[in-house]
Structure formats: C-alpha cells, structure tokens
Amino acid sequence: MIKFPVKYINGNYLVTIDNDGTKTRETIDNEFIPTRPETIDLNISNFCKNACPWCYMDASPQGRHGDVIAIKNMKIPPYTEVALNYALHPNLVTIFHMLREKRAITNMTIHQNDLLKYHKLIKGFQLQHYIYGIGISVTDVNDRLIKIINRFDNVVIHVIAGITPIKTLEKMKDLGYKVLILGYKTKGRGLNVKPNLIEYKYNFDNIQDWFKIVSYDNLALEQLNIKDYITKEIWDTHYMGEEGQFSFFIDAVEKKYYKSSTESKGFDINNLTIKEMFENVKKNKM
C-alpha cells in the first residue's frame, strides 16, 4: 500500500502526488528537466466487446492480450503513475501484483458498460489498493450508472471531444465530478469518426461550470483551441507539458513504445529499460 502524499525527486524538481491524484511540480530553475517518466500509459490488451466505433486500438472480441512477461521485466521507477486500459486480461490480478511490487501508482480506465457489469470486482481492486484512480469512459448516463460511480474513490469521468454528446455531460452536472476531455484519435476505427467540435467549443463555459475540475489531454487542447478561451496565466500555471515530455505510451500487446497513443510509428521494447525508452522519446528518436 502506498502512503500519500508521495514525494520524489525527478531530475531538477520535486514531484508531489496527493491521495486524490493532484500532482504538483516544484523547482528553483526556469524549467523542469525530468530524468524518468512521471506517467506511463500501458495497453495490456486489445480484447474488448464494446465495439466503440471510435476505438483507436481497434479493440474487438478477437483482440490479443498483452505479454505478462514483458510487463514483469519492465523496470518501472517507484511512484510512476501507470494508467492501464481495462481489459478482460486472464492474468489481470497477476499484473496488479507485479505493478504493486514495483511500487507503481496504478490507475485504470474502464468503459461504463464494463463498470456496470463488474463494479463489485473493480471496487474490490480499489479496496485492495491494486488501483487508486479510476477513469470511467462515459457515453451515456442513467441513474444506475451514477449510483455505481458514486461508490468509488478518485473517479475521473472520461469523455471524447466532439464524440460524447454534450447532453451526456449535462446529465452529470453539479454532481461534483472531475472530468477529463480527450481528443479524438484518427487511428484504428477512429479514422471513420466525424466529431462535432463546434458543440464543445460553444459550451466551453458551461462545461467548466458543471464540474468540480475539468482537464484536457494534449490532443483535446489542440483540437478545441483551448488557449483561445483562457488567460495566459492560467495556461502557464496549469499546462502539464507536451506529449513525451513527462510521459509516454507502451503497448504490451505489440511490445512497442511510442511518444503517445496518438502516434502510429513505434519502436520495439527489446531489452530497453523504462528510462532508456523515455530518453529516446524525449530526444525525438521516434
């Protein structure tokens, strides 16, 4: 079990992570220069029955599972936040054990359909401290889903800019949720989507008022032109860095690593350490 707040030195700065997932960086220098990743997005399976038409992984019931040995061999620095995509991996608990032994802060993203089916199992994972934060990919909302969401700690609602209807967000307003707005990825089945970004831009102020905290991934920041809606001061104090600057993406199915999950070109993991992969990403060798 990890005791929060967590503090560690990364290069020339101090990282602090609170038990609600809030992260701060502090340095006496003019810039943050990391020597290790703060976050790793880890794909452990392409098996999924939800058939989302925008899925960038092209996940399906025929999808393959990630290599457990490859995950075991990853020398992940302590207190790295590892974001797992939820999948019905036959060795999921084994993977949790591996990550806990590495003292990783493991978070999980789960589709709302799977949460409705397996919420007791997922709650058990959280109670056993296998996972800390839970990202819930929401497409539509009903009373049962909200009731189940409220049983969990450290929840972040995930929606996709221009894909998740604004009316879905409005159904969750004033419930005290944290929301992460993701950009739509033009990979896999996402090549065929036609997002309605205008709807999100028009409702920017409403979305900020509806939720406790609203954040955006780098792709959504670009697609929605968020800089046009906020002050420079807010941008400078809240922006968490470019893709590959503090994080990167590992696909344990294909045994490749990427600057981010938006990239199509990746490189083989081979016997590289996490720090070596991260350095390659930072040096734009992708």
Image: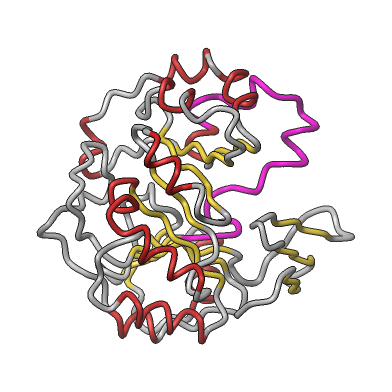
**Where is 208 relative to 263, above or below?**
above
| Of 256 and 193, the residue lying toward us | 193
Residue at the image position 56 percent from the left and 70 percent from the top: 105
Which of the colour schemes (rainbow, by chain, secondary structure, one colour) is used? secondary structure
Residue 34 spot, x, y in % from top left = 68, 66
* Number of numbered labels in the structure image: 0
State which region is magenta: 222-248
Residue at the image position 76 percent from the left and 58 percent from the top: 25
Residue 31: which quarter of the image? bottom right
Tell me the quarter of the image containing the N terminus: bottom right
| Of 277 and 40, the residue lying toward us | 40
Residue 129 spot, x, y in % from top left = 53, 74
Residue 75 spot, x, y in % from top left = 49, 83
Residue 240 magenta: yes
**Where is 160 relative to 62, above or below?**
above
Residue at the image position 61 percent from the left and 32 percent from the top: 211
Is 77 left, or right, of 63 in this rendering? right
Q: Residue furthest right?
A: 28
**Where is 179 relative to 252, above or below?**
above
Q: Residue furthest left?
A: 62
Tell me the quarter of the image containing the C terminus: bottom left
**Where is 244 relative to 156, above or below?**
below
| Of 19 and 204, the residue lying toward us | 19
Residue 141 magenta: no
| Of 242 and 102, the residue lying toward us | 102
Residue at the image position 50 percent from the left and 76 percent from the top: 128
Is 261 left, or right, of 170 in this rendering? left
Residue 101 spot, x, y in % from top left = 51, 87
